[in-house]
Every structure is written in C-alpha cells, then in structure tokens.
Amino acid sequence: MTHQSHAYHMVKPSPWPLTGALSALLMTSGLTMWFHFHSMTLLMLGLLTNTLTMYQWWRDVTRESTYQGHHTPPVQKGLRYGMILFITSEIFFFAGFFWAFYHSSLAPTPQLGGHWPPTGITPLNPLEVPLLNTSVLLASGVSITWAHHSLMENNRNQMIQALLITILLGLYFTLLQASEYFESPFTISDGIYGSTFFVATGFHGLHVIIGSTFLTICFIRQLMFHFTSKHHFGFEAAAWYWHFVDVVWLFLYVSIYWWGS
Amino acid sequence: MQALRVSQALIRSFSSTARNRFQNRVREKQKLFQEDNDIPLYLKGGIVDNILYRVTMTLCLGGTVYSLYSLGWASFPRN
C-alpha cells in the first residue's frame, strides 16, 4: 500500500461537482419557466438539489478534515488564501452596486427633480431602525471575537454562549430589516432610488442570512467537539465572512441611509 | 432562605454540568471514516449516505431531462 510523501490533500472523486452544476441548470431554467410560464416546479427542484449538494459537499469536507486528518498546515494555508480571495470577489460584487448608487445620487437628473433623494421619495430615518441595525451588527462583531478568544483559551461553555449570542443578533438584524422592508413607504419599482436601495440592501440581507447559516453550522460543530483551541479554520472563515458582512452594512448605512437621506 | 433555595435550584438547572448532553464522539467517527474498506467518502457514513446520494442524483438527472423537455415545449409558440 503506497502512502503520499507530501503534506497536500489529493481529493478523491466526488459526485457533488456534477450535482452542483446540474442544480445550477435547474435553477436557471427554473427561473425562466417561472418568469415566462408561471411554473415553479423546475425552480423548486433546482433549489432542493442545490441545498442537497451543498449539505453533502461540505459534510464531506468535514469528514476529510476532522475525521480523516487531511487538513495539514499547508492545506489550511491554501484554504485561508481561498477564503480571502472569495471574500475579495464579494467586495467587488458589492462595489458594483455602490458604484450604481453613487453614479445616480451624485448627479441627480432633472427627471428626479435635480436632487437626492428624488421628488416623491420619503427616505427612512437613519436614526431609527437603521441605527439599531448598525448597533446590532457591531455588537455581533464583538461577540464573535469573544467566541474566538474563548475557543483559543479552551473555554468551551463561553465559546458556545458567545457564538449563540452572535447568531441571535444576526437573526435579530434579519427580522428588523424584514419589518423595515414591509413598512417601507417606497418600493423597488420607485425609480432609481428604489432600485439602488433594495438591490444593495437586499443582497446585503442575503449575505447576512448566509453568514448566519455558516455560524450556525460552526455552532453545531462546536457542540460536537470538532474544534480544538489550535485548529478551527472553519470557525475563522465564518468569522471573517461575518466581519465582511458587518463592514458592508457600515458602508450601506453611511452611503445610502445617512448621506443619501 | 426562600431566595437562596430558588437561586440554588436555578443554578442547578442552568449549570454547565447539568447540560452535558453532548459527548465527544470524534474518536469513533475518525475510526469509522479511516476504516480500510474502499467505500468512497460520500458513502462511508452508512445507509443514510446511500439514500441521500441516490435521491440527490435522481432529482438532478430527472430534473435535467425535465428541463430539456421544458426547453422543447417553450420553443414552440402556442396561442
């Protein structure tokens, strides 16, 4: 039986890249069928197979690392680079929406009334729920740092508590934002103001939900004793992502909610 | 006296020692997934892995056929 003489992880064949690609086909063709023919079957099938793929693929990564020991220091370094590059790509993604917002708001056209916010738009008061949302996310940044330090100091119960607080704050933000969306006096179809507002804050909200899900997975793994005080990259990746989500919100709050009001 | 008994009861119900429902089963999992049995990783966990794999693949392949059928259907105009 031959053993490898290097520290890298040569992954074994897996069906999940194929099912992931097929689920992408089902989601996109599903959107088409929904938009044009009012049928949601393909879309639902796509979302389901996408979720199944993500669950099994990431379950296998946990098996490769925690149970089989493939995540040596060089492998972990590669994963760190990967997460950093991914977050960088997400920064560019949001940069586009901020570009769109500033393009329209710095030089408002005569059709908008020549000012920003445009005529007819009553913007949300930045000192009400948006300010609360800011404090909620900032607090969650503190609690996740507390969780990390507890983990590094082998303080199991404090880590669980702090991570739970972080997740609950994330949920609170999502609920507050959902109620803001429901109560808002303007909609996505209210000109360029509505478009920039809801696309930028909407994608941010989606990322809060993704981040909260990632943190919840980490919570479950912590309960199952997967993390050690020295090796817990999954948690660090989740923490980096969470801080990124927090920073995007700060930019949104200052640009769209405060300066834009 | 009452207050002391109440607080003691609260501490007993919420103390970390009372919450030790989770045992460290990582060793057992490591043994299971390192067993030399040629089963691929995505099936190595047991019967649930098999079911989940088959359901996922069936839905994906069936869905692909359905999406191609839908494409064919959508390609021809109807009044």
Image: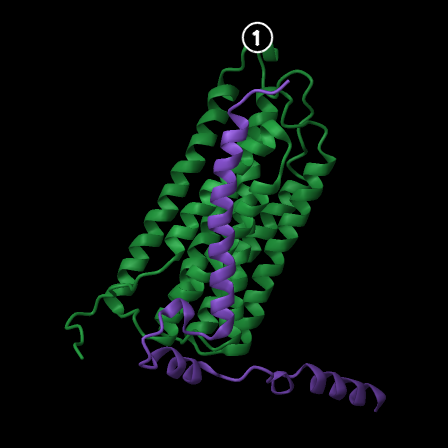
Chain colours: A green, B purple
* Residue in the image at 36% along x and 73% along y: B39
Quarter of the image with the N terminus of chain A in it? bottom left
Q: Mark 1 falls within which chain?
A: A
Specify the farthest residue to the top: A110
User: Residue B73, relative to residue A131: is it above or below?
Assistant: above
Among the 4 quarters of the image, the one containing residue A75: bottom left
**Residue A136: percent from the left, percent from the top?**
61, 52
Examine the rendering and report whether any part of residue A235 can be seen: no
User: Residue A9, relative to residue B31: is it above or below?
Assistant: above
Q: Is residue A209 left or right of residue A60?
A: right
**Residue A140: percent from the left, percent from the top?**
55, 57
Label 1 CA crowd tier, 10 Å (few <14, some 14–19, many 20+) = few
**Residue A228: percent from the left, percent from the top?**
40, 76
Instruction: Report how many numbered discs are placed on residues in the image.
Output: 1
User: Residue A31, relative to residue A222: is it above or below?
Assistant: above
* Residue in the image at 40% along x and 56% along y: A16
Specify the farthest residue to the left: A5
Task: Name the foreground residue: B65 vs A63.
Answer: B65
Task: Name the foreground residue: A4 vs A230.
Answer: A4
- Residue corresponding to mark 1: A110
Examine the rendering and report whether any part of residue A239 can be seen: yes
Task: Name the foreground residue: A237 vs A166.
Answer: A237
SS of the residue under disc 1: helix
User: Residue A96, relative to residue A234: is it above or below?
Assistant: above
